[in-house]
């Protein structure tokens, strides 16, 4: 599967908000050390969890999207089901066990 970077607000709308599939979005910054460290783990999760789409959003490239969602720290992982944010699943920080647990919860 892999993790696909979203480049425009319209693409975010189409691939995340309008999606009927569960979606995980990794909000990151290129200068963020923890973001770079966890990226291979997120790639692994994307390959192990069929039925969930994984995307990443550079908060500097799509600052309006990040601001609209209240993203204040990186990395932040936001989980969507039927285009709706599942606030209880949001993970702030590079915490693989929490992210993996919440991917499973998204599929439940």
Image (tube, grey):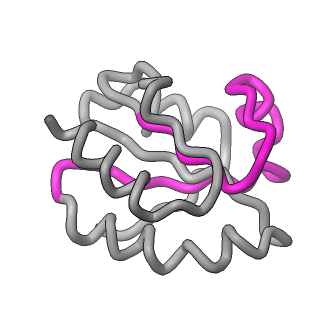
Tell whether position 47 is magenta: no
State the image quarter where residue 56 is shown: bottom right
Magenta part of the chain: 50-79
The reply, left or right, for residue 102 in relation to residue 62 is left
Q: Residue at x 41, y 73 (%)?
A: 43
Q: Quadrant of the N terminus?
A: bottom left
From this view, report whether residue 51 is shown above or below residue 30: above
Residue 93 quadrant: bottom right
Is 65 colored magenta in this rendering? Answer: yes
Q: Residue at x 85, y 71 (%)?
A: 31
Q: Where is residue 101 in the image (x, y as percent from the top left)?
A: 31, 50
Of residues 8 and 63, which is closer to you in this image? 63
Name the foreground residue: 6 vs 98: 98
Image-based side of 28 in relation to 18, left or right: right
Q: Is residue 59 left or right of residue 39?
A: right
Q: Which residue is drawn at 53% across and 29% down?
A: 13
Question: Which x, y percent locates residue 96?
Answer: 45, 64
Pick the front one: 10 or 90: 90
In which image quadrant can residue 50 be found?
bottom left
**How many marks on residues?**
0
Percent position of residue 29, x then y: 78, 61
In the picture, which quadrant includes the C terminus? top left
The location of residue 59, given as percent across then percent down, is 77, 49
- Please report the residue visible at 80 percent of the width from the left and 38 percent of the height from the top: 72
- Answer above or below: position of 39 versus 4: below
């Amino acid at each position: 599967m892999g993790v696909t970077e979203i480049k425009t607000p319209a693409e975010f709308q189409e691939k995340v908000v309008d999606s009927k599939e569960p979606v995980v979005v990794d909000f990151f910054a290129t200068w963020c050390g923890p973001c770079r460290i966890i990226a291979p783990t997120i790639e692994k999760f994307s390959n192990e969890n069929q039925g969930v789409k994984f995307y990443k959003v550079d908060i500097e490239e799509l600052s309006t999207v990040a601001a609209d969602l209240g993203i204040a720290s990186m990395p932040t992982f936001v989980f969507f089901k039927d285009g709706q944010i599942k606030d209880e699943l949001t993970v702030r920080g590079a915490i693989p066990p929490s992210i993996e647990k919440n991917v499973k919860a998204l599929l439940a």
